DNA sequence: TTGTTTTTACGAATGCTTTCGTATATACTT
DNA sequence: AAGTATATACGAAAGCATTCGTAAAAACAA
């Protein structure tokens, strides 16, 4: 029997994951410094959170050296997909359409981005075989 | 000085708001029954939640009769928009594009829905003036 | 009127997330 | 070697969301 899927991260955990995804395996010090560019967070607060994340299986850590190095256990896209599905259910009763319409409607989307979406739609449509 | 914006609903509160949006002003009994179609929830649990929602300004209630009637204070679209913006920031660092691509890519979207989105894109493109 | 049902009100327990103080170990500096 | 800086570990406090027990009031039924 293998382990279950990694659990859903809390908001603070997600904030840390974003940093791990962007910069790769990092020390607590590094992550805490990054967090403090946004808002004040105590070092031991970040440490504790990252320890919990390792416990939960959200992050892996290398403890060979004194300074432990943490890395995200799950990929960014996988995690986003899971969070998105859940959010979709809760806030939009599962209607991806409604949500996409809201997102496109209210976020001023650039022409280039619209082109990208059109390209994606064409790709999806042609995959129908 | 007027009141601040209505606060962000928690997950349980959102569940109740969905019912209020769908069925309009409702009693605690009605909402609790609806919730119980999905999962078991005690009556006083629902009552308490709805009282808190009234406190927070998420719902308004009419207390003229013995059975209080609650209604959502904010509209569904407004609330969805606010939740979406926040979710976008947290999970997708604010990139609506990335999220839309994920949503379209992984949710099997029907041809009709794709057409709707194409229509929306055309509308956005033509609004450029 | 007396007992039953339905409703609101209140408070408290539980559980989860976040924050941080303190202790201890390890490395670095002089 | 002694003192300072940096790291992990641990536990507990604080805050918030959720759940529910109990009491009191109001309506209804016999």
Image (spheres, coloured by chain):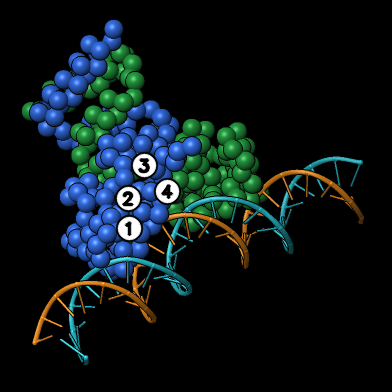
Chain colours: A blue, B green, C orange, D cyan
Asked which quadrant contains residue C30, the reply is bottom left
Specify few, some or many for label 2: CA neighbours under 10 Å numbering under 14, 14-19, or 20 or more: many
Q: Chain of mark 2?
A: A
Discs 4, 3 touching: Cβ within 8 Å: yes
From the viewer's side, name the closer residue of A11 and D10: D10
Discs 4, 1 touching: Cβ within 8 Å: no
Identify the residue position indicated by label 1 in the image.
A50
- Residue A120 placed where, x, y %? 20, 21
Q: CA distance from mark 3 to mark 1?
A: 32 Å
Identify the residue position indicated by label 3 in the image.
B79
Identify the residue position indicated by label 4 in the image.
B9
Determine whether the residue tagged by mark 1 lies in a helix, strand or loop.
helix
Identify the residue position indicated by label 2 in the image.
A59
- Residue B35 placed where, x, y %? 57, 38
Answer with left or right where residue A82 lies relative to residue A37: right
Q: CA distance from mark 2 to mark 1?
A: 8 Å
Instruction: Give the number of the disc on residue B113.
Output: none
Specify few, some or many for label 1: CA neighbours under 10 Å numbering under 14, 14-19, or 20 or more: many
């Amino acid at each position: 029997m293998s382990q279950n899927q990694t659990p859903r991260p809390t908001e603070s955990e997600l904030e840390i994951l974003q940093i791990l995804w962007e910069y790769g395996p990092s020390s607590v010090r590094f992550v805490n410094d990054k967090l403090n560019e946004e808002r004040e967070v105590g070092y031991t607060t970040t440490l504790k959170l990252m320890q919990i994340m390792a416990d939960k299986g959200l992050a892996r850590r290398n403890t060979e050296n004194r300074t432990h190095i943490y890395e995200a256990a799950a990929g960014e896209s996988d995690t986003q997909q899971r969070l998105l599905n859940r959010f979709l259910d809760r806030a939009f009763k599962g209607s991806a359409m409604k949500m996409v319409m809201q997102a496109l409607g209210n976020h001023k989307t650039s022409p280039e981005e619209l082109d990208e979406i059109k390209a994606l739609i064409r790709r999806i449509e042609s995959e129908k075989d």
